[in-house]
Amino acid sequence: MGKFLEKGRVISNEQLSKDMWQIELRAPKIATASVPGQFLMVGLSGYLRRPFGVADVNGDCLKMIYRIVGSGTHHMMKLKPGEALDVEGPLGVGFAAGRGSDECSRHILVGGGAGLAPLLLLAHDLYDRHVPAEVIIGAKNEQEASFWKKLFNPYIETIHVTTDDGSAGVKGFPTDVLPKLLNEGHDTSVECCGPGIMMKGIAGIASACGARCEVSLESRMACGFGVCLGCSFTGADGRRHRVCKDGPVFPSEVVW
């Protein structure tokens, strides 16, 4: 399906934790066309468009989860219901599981921090298709882990939590939990998004256990559709890849 440019009307804009927010927009064409793992280029008044993953879809509305990191996201958190944003999308290549082109009978979703956002829509999609899945939530602390658990609860029965400070779940990182889960079953696919060092570790564990692994990369983007080459990188195959056009989701062996 193609991409669209819509005025996304704000339905709600709520604070999830100290620095994390969730905004819901009515953008019917984009919401209907979005596949888990794809992203949007969002235009804020006075700012260049910037990429945000599609966190969930409900009818003609979509959700984005964002962290307050600069003046642009500070502006976004002040938006009220009824106000509008320029939204272009859906863009990029999503997860194979979200496209229905995989044959794995079990999925393990692994996310760290804000990287959990695109995995939420994948969890929703797998739930709707009755495909077994579980999630590993990597969070800073109990407060952050708590809202992620609440968001995943409607779609995922088995939720594993790791926290940096040990205030919830296992003290450590998703890489400390994944090996045991992979040893418990076969025909498993791992879908991952988060800090690069975490994803590389997850990819290595998946490879050692014979599991397929896809990673969703994050990158600064100027255009969002492969023209400026600002988000390109040299993959393990020696080729140049564009995160916005060829990804953001890649088989892990393409990246490392």
Image (spheres, rainbow, N blue to C red):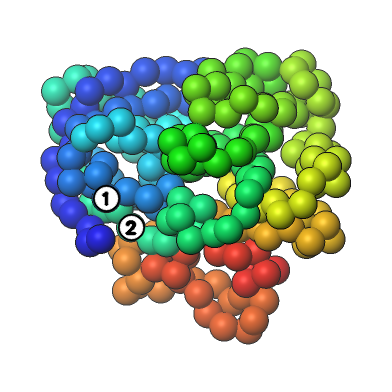
Residue at the spot 33% in from the left edge and 58% down from the top edge: 91
Residue 35, horizontal then vertical, whole percent: 38, 50
In the displayed structure, 225 sits above or below 34; it is: below
Q: Are marks 2 and 1 in contact (CB under 8 Å)?
A: no
In the displayed structure, 11 sits above or below 212; it is: above
- Of residues 249 and 223, the one nearer the viewer is 249
Q: CA distance from mark 2 to mark 1?
A: 10 Å
The amino acid marked with disc number 2 is Leu
Residue at the spot 14% in from the left edge and 40% down from the top edge: 7
Residue 224, horizontal then vertical, whole percent: 33, 61
Location of residue 102 (image quadrant): bottom right
Mark number for residue 246?
none
Is residue 183 shown left or right of residue 189? right
Q: Is disc 2 placed on a helix, strand or loop?
A: strand
Residue for badge 1: 33
Q: Using the rendered image of the protein, determine whether residue 4 is visible from the camera's viewpoint.
A: yes
Is residue 199 shown left or right of residue 130? right
Location of residue 45 (image quadrant): top left
Residue 67, horizontal then vertical, whole percent: 47, 32
Is residue 204 shown left or right of residue 12? right
- Of residues 76 and 92, the one nearer the viewer is 92
Residue for badge 2: 91
The amino acid marked with disc number 1 is Ala
